[in-house]
Image (spheres, rainbow, N blue to C red):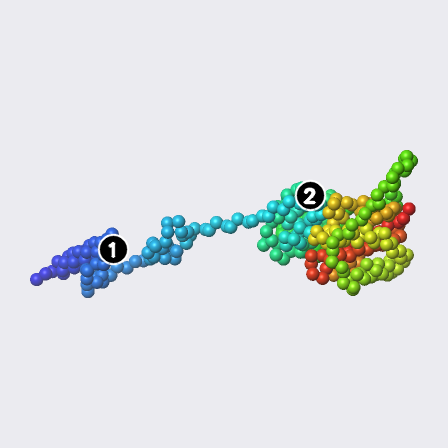
Amino acid sequence: MRTPTSTCRVIFRYSALWTLLLALSACARATTGIESTLPPTSPPPGTPALVVESMTPVPAAETAAANTDSAAPDDAPSATTALPAEPQVFIQHPVEPGDTLWGLAVQYGVPMAAIQLQNNLGASTVVKAGDVLEIPPPDAWESASTYWVVYEVASGDTLSGIAARYGLTTAALVQANDLASADFLSIGQSLILPLRAPAQVLVEAPVPTDTPIVLQLPTPTLAAPGPPAAPTVIVAATVAPLPADIAAWPREVWRIMNETRAAYGLPPYAYNDTLALAAQLHAEDCSQRGSCSHTGSDGSDIKTRVQRVGYTGSYAECWAVRASPQGVIDIWLDETPPNDPHRRTVLHTWFTEVGIGVAPSPWKGYYYVIADFGRPR
């Protein structure tokens, strides 16, 4: 008869032997992949149960990897490998005569500020023919207007003051520039102005102030008689004729302009056909190349253009791309002093006459409108 002690020894030995067999079976399966023909792995009755008090959880990704056959190629990314970010594609744009910053912004669907920042232009809106600009992708600027532009902080500037100057809110500036605080600005810091209209940024050439501008022509010198000089031939750009309602725009813009001047107690501008010819030729030039500025496609400026048509005196020019005559006047007047050159020109006290030209733009329903102002000698 076995004693309880000897019985315990037998059970212990049987359990140890069973555990050893189980370990050898698992090892065989792991190394050969052959299913074991050993009996089920549950211990026989009476074998002490194995109790595990603590176990470190295995991450799900590791568990999935351990339970999945390795059929993927060696270079396939694992569950824990970060995929490299796709590189951003930048367009290289060679600047041509007649290109403007806003025109490029419209062409590529990005704000002017995006081009300024990408090319370290600072607050300048001038692009130079022959330069190559890098145009960033539009993805990061989906909610931005093409009129967004860079402003450089000057001494004494405050965020609220800049906002008031450009008809914005402080909150809009903070959001557009991702500022941590509205209280700290540094001189020379580039801020994005989230403008909704081009009134503050379309001027690319100085416009006269209230100081009279006198065009000094050289004194003619007497020359020996000779064959008469060939007359100057002015060739208009090839542009489709305007519809009747659009052809009436120049006089309608002039009428609204004079109504506005009357509201300010100013005398009306006279309509000058010579200035209108210069304006129309420039409008058609803008239409033909699909962009506009105060520089013609041949490099001409306002002085050259009014002289070509025979106008002598003081002069200035405004241009816009709008869908109605009223919209033209509205955009010129919707400026805040002291950054209001168009507004000051429309309400000028020195100029006495104006001529207006209109031609189609690349945008359906919008037209280039050029207004050449003057005071004859």
Query: What's under tag 1, amino acid-wise?
Result: Gly
* Lateral position of residue 349 relative to residue 41, left or right: right
Q: Is residue 38 above or below residue 89?
A: below
Tag of residue 54: none
The residue at 65%/53% (across/down) is 107
Query: Is residue 166 shown left or right of residue 78?
Result: right
Q: Quadrant of the N terminus?
A: bottom left
Instruction: Residue 288: give x, y in percent of width and height.
Output: 72, 53
Q: Residue at x 75, y 52 (%)?
A: 237
Residue 290 visible somewhere in the drawing: yes
Q: Is residue 348 visible?
A: no
Q: CA distance from mark 2 to mark 1?
A: 73 Å
According to the picture, the residue beneath numbered tag 2 turns out to be: 129
Q: Looking at this view, is 257 or 223 the one in front?
A: 223
Q: Return the residue found at the far left.
A: 1
Residue at 78% from the left image edge and 45% from the top image edge: 301
Residue visible at 21% across and 62% down? 40
Question: Does dot 2 land on a helix, a strand or a loop?
Answer: loop
The answer to whether residue 243 is left or right of residue 225 is left
Q: Say the numbered circle drawn on residue 33.
A: 1
Return the x and y of residue 51 as percentages of the image width and height. 28, 59
| Front residue of this view, candidates 112 and 95 | 95
Q: Secondary structure at mark 1?
A: loop
